[in-house]
Amino acid sequence: MRSPFAYIPRRGPLQSARPGAAVTYLGALVVVAFLYSSPFVLLAAGAAACIAGCLAGASKAVRASLRMGLALALLIVVVEALVVDRGETVLLRAGHWPILGQVDITLEAIVAGTVVGLRAAVTIVAFAVYSACVDPDRVTRALRPLAARSALTATLVSRLVPVAAADAARLRDAARLRGPGAAPVGKGPLARRLLAGSLDRSVDVAATLELRGYSLSGRRLEQRREPSRHDARFYLAAAAVLAAAIVGKSLGADDFHTYPTIQLGLGPATAAVSAVVAASGLAPWRRSGRRV
């Protein structure tokens, strides 16, 4: 079973571009998510990441990351609502709890948690698109002149995380196939079995790398440049997103406050920044032409 976050070679602008161009493009969306608190801009960044992933052929990764991001966002909202009691609009007085004390759920705390959850969801979707569309081998070749060991570690992580996800799916399927008479398997035993399998695989990978001479210091090979005609569009899209975000921030596009009361502004600057960020998701679009 292949993980939805695993890299699959495809013919597309985002896959053909250099790793630096793809990372700059997707990183610009993450920077906007951390730079702004306005829900309109955060939704625009999330929409851009989803559109870019779907246009690049990574719709499965987008759907899986959306499920993970929305679940994490819901958890953040619940924790924020229970822990933070700031705000003037009290929705529910839940009484005195053993550890949390007096719990007052306010509308402002829920909105603040929603903003943090949206930021986390945008980041998860952007990294999912990166994992599914950027070749880790090309990333290794790009980072090898700078840090060979770090590049190897990053490549192993990007390769083994989808393998661990596939192992978890296989373990869940095996637990379901044990029959109705078998005792139910909880998340704890599954997690321990997955951890044990991951440790065994790491030992095997380390032994294989040692046998292939990765622990020895060899001579550096000259790195060949791999230019792509799609690099310029992603660099331009990232520059446009960052420029619009910085200019919009200085013009008050992030007019959003949660405490003590909610203040949500949708001015021309906010609308312009949201439009530019959302339109950047069309960068991986490829025109379909006839073959010669």
Image (cartoon, rainbow, N blue to C red):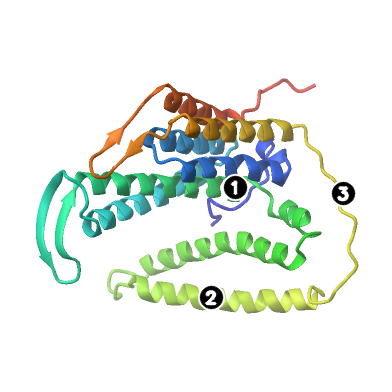
Viewer-nearest residue: 95 or 151: 95
User: CA–CA distance between discs 3 and 2?
Assistant: 37 Å
Residue labelled with disc 2 = 197
Q: Residue at x 70, y 65 (%)?
A: 150
Q: Residue at x 90, y 55 (%)?
A: 222
Q: Quadrant of residue 72?
A: bottom left
Quarter of the image with the N terminus in it = bottom right
Where residue 244 sits in the image (x, y, percent)?
55, 30
Mark 2: amino acid: Gly
In this view of the protein, can residue 12 be seen by the observer? no
Residue labelled with disc 1 = 130
Q: Quadrant of residue 263?
A: top left
Q: Marks 3 and 2: CB-CB under 8 Å?
A: no
Q: Vertical placement of 72 versus 22: above or below?
A: below
Q: Vertical placement of 198 versus 268: above or below?
A: below
Viewer-nearest residue: 252 or 241: 252
Where residue 203 sits in the image (x, y, percent)?
64, 79
First of labels 2, 1 by sequence position: 1
Please tell me how crowded label 3 is: few (under 14), some (14-19), or many (20+) other residues with Cα within 10 Å.
Answer: few
Mark 3: amino acid: Arg
User: CA–CA distance between discs 2 and 1?
Assistant: 26 Å
Q: Vertical placement of 102 versus 186: above or below?
A: above
- Give the mark toward the camera: 2 or 1: 1
Residue labelled with disc 3 = 224
First of labels 3, 2 by sequence position: 2
In this view of the protein, can residue 67 be seen by the observer? yes
